[in-house]
Image (spheres, rainbow, N blue to C red):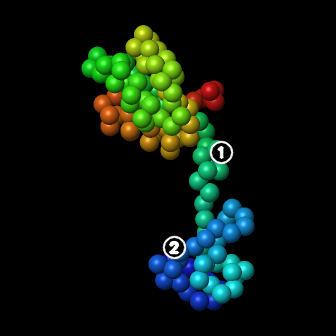
Amino acid sequence: MAALCGRVPLSPTQAFNLTKSGGDKHYFHKQCPNRSTLMTATTTFDLRKSRKMSPPYRVMLHNDNYNKREYVVQVLMKVIPGMTVDIAVNVMQEAHHNGLAVVIVCAQVDAEDHCMQLRGNGLLSSVEPASDGC
């Protein structure tokens, strides 16, 4: 799909050479001499708003008999943004003693990404809807 700068169609290379200006959903072409000309053939999607509005999902950590506790803590801190040593130790301990622990509650797309990263590092993980929002 070609974007438009005023009435001039843009090549795919030019269409990606955009700057955000003003509101959340309006983009203007950098090379257009009249920057007030809105590109009408392009629509944007604000992923941050979508994630805030999507229902929450839990990333669950399952206990296993293979990984050392220290390794689990290291992986949690590497994969989960903002995860501190104290929180990672608490999550690991809960999974170790109860068989299951909540790692993080977030948007579905983020939860699935975190789950895949945990699995990619050898941990047992799953995703489930957070029905009560917590």
Q: Is residue 1 above or below residue 57?
A: below
Residue at the spot of label 1: 53
As drawn, is 13 to the left or to the right of 36?
Answer: left
Dot 1 or dot 2: first in sequence order is 2
Residue 77: x and y, percent?
Answer: 44, 31
* Between 80 and 128, the one nearer to me in the picture: 80
Q: Which x, y percent locates residue 67?
A: 30, 21
Marks 1 and 2, Cα distance to the nearest angstrom?
27 Å
Instruction: Report helix, strand or loop for mark 1.
Output: helix
Is 63 left, or right, of 85 in this rendering? left
Position of residue 88 relative to residue 50, above or below, is above
Three-letter amino acid code at the position of disc 1 = Met
Q: Residues within 10 Å of mark 1 (few under 14, many from 20)?
A: few
Image coords of residue 24 (percent x, y): 69, 62
Q: Is residue 108 above or below residue 35?
A: above
Which amino acid type corresponds to the residue marked 2 in the rendered image?
Phe
Q: Is residue 59 above or below residue 28?
A: above
Q: In percent of the image, x 44 and y 14: which residue is there?
A: 93
Q: Where is residue 39? Give x, y as percent.
A: 64, 78
Q: Residue furthest front?
A: 85
Q: Is residue 130 visible?
A: yes
Q: Furthest-left residue in view?
A: 66
The residue singled out by tag 2 in the image is 16
